[in-house]
Image (tube, rainbow, N blue to C red):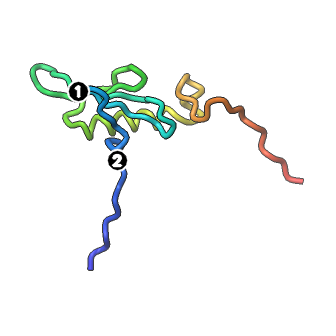
Amino acid sequence: MPPREEPRWHPILAAVETEFGVWVLSDQYGHEYGRVRIVRVDGVPRYRGELGGELLGYGGTLREACARVHQAWISAHGPQARSSGGVDAFPGTTKAPLPTRR
């Protein structure tokens, strides 16, 4: 018997259509971090991905656009991103010194 493929999560599951043609991606606390909206570019339907109101690009499918927005959000976390003005992954916290060995 072939191995069973486990269900996989995809960023499109975080997208909620708040108005016709506009999907909002929210974090685990319900804060919006990105949007995807359907638009026409040269007469062709495209999905415009935005992170924090800034254009990331256009996808040919909703799935592709959601993945792009989610990947940009994930990439915006971490020490290097925070030092360059990126997202603070743990807002309201301060870095505590590492414990020393005795």
User: Which x, y percent locates residue 69?
Assistant: 36, 33
User: Which x, y percent locates residue 31?
Assistant: 48, 31
Q: Is residue 86 rendered to the left or right of residue 52?
A: right
Q: Kindly identify the amino acid type of the residue bearing the numbered disc 1.
A: Phe
Instruction: Say the numbered circle drawn on residue 20.
Output: 1
13, above or below 47, in the image? below
* Distance in Å between CA atoms under marks 2 and 1: 21 Å
Q: Number of numbered discs present?
A: 2
Q: Residue at x 26, y 80 (%)?
A: 1
6, above or below 61, in the image? below
Residue 47 sits in quarter: top left
Q: Secondary structure at mark 2?
A: loop
Camera-side residue of 84 and 35: 35
Q: Is residue 42 rendered to the left or right of residue 81?
A: left
Instruction: Say the numbered circle drawn on residue 9.
Output: none
Q: Secondary structure at mark 1?
A: loop
Quarter of the image where the C terminus is located: bottom right
Q: Residue reaching furthest front? A: 19
Q: Residue reaching furthest left? A: 43
The 10 Å Cα crowd at callout 2, few under 14, some 14 to 19, many 20 or more, is few
Q: Residue reaching furthest bottom? A: 1
Q: Residue at x 21, y 27 (%)?
A: 38
Q: Kindly identify the amino acid type of the residue bearing the numbered disc 2.
A: His
Q: Residue at x 61, y 35 (%)?
A: 90
Q: Is residue 10 rendered to the left or right of residue 40?
A: right
| Viewer-side label of 2, 1 | 1
User: Which x, y percent locates residue 53?
Assistant: 39, 20
Residue under circle 2?
10
Camera-side residue of 39 and 24: 24
